[in-house]
Image (cartoon, rainbow, N blue to C red):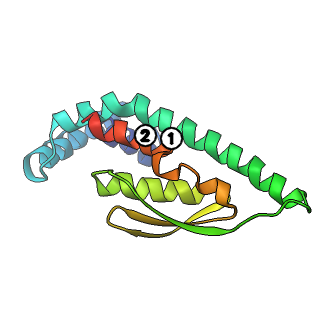
Amino acid sequence: MYLILLLLWFIFSGKITLEIALFGLVICSWLYWFMTKYMDYNVKKDIALIKKIPLFLLYGVTLVCEVIKSNLAVIRIVLSPGLECEPTFTTFQTDLKTEVARVTLANSITLTPGTYTCGLEGNTYTVHALDKKFTEGIDESVFVKQLRKLEESV
């Protein structure tokens, strides 16, 4: 977090001089100390986030790959006039523990073309899909598996 604060300091400063750099180091150090003392933040959280960076990157790559695959599937449906699609609503539940993981899953489903998360209540999702085959195995998708790994690696 300290490095992020320092990076933001340099970005918003506009230029880097010795005085600005030293003043930034002091201000960011004080702000980091304040966060750890009064805002229930600690260095262990920083270390845990740094350890999770490969998992976050893997999730991002997986999301991009799934968006591309879904784009190709939707293009195939749109450009094939004889191909019948069966729009459907599906509900399913997950065992994701954190609200952040559940919302990330809902947003990932919505980002992939052909599916839209209509509702999220607790662990129950309601998804509208352009075709029935888009919802096959959605409750144990690659998104769910990777979000579980992110939750476990605390």
Instruction: Judge left or right: residue 119 versus residue 18.
Output: right
What residue did someone put label 2 on? 145
What residue did someone put label 1 on? 142
- The alpha-carbon separation of the residues under discs 2 and 1 comes to 5 Å
Instruction: Judge left or right: residue 29 versus residue 49.
Output: left
User: Residue sitting at 35 percent across and 32 percent down?
Assistant: 52
SS at circle 1 = helix
Instruction: Judge left or right: residue 57 versus residue 17.
Output: right
User: Residue sitting at 35 percent across and 41 percent down?
Assistant: 148
Q: Amino acid at mark 2?
A: Lys
User: Residue sitting at 54 percent across and 56 percent down?
Assistant: 109
Q: Of residues 52 and 74, which is closer to you in this image?
A: 74
Crowd around label 1: few <14 · some 14–19 · many ≥20 (10 Å):
some
* Disc 2 and disc 1 in contact, CB within 8 angstroms: yes
The x and y percentages for residue 69 are 70, 44
Instruction: Judge left or right: residue 66 versus residue 4.
Output: right
Q: Is residue 124 visible?
A: yes
Establish if 26 lies above or below 112. above
The x and y percentages for residue 114 are 67, 60
Q: Of residues 142 and 52, which is closer to you in this image?
A: 142
Q: Quadrant of residue 9?
A: top left
Q: Of residues 151 and 122, which is closer to you in this image?
A: 122
Q: Is residue 112 visible?
A: no
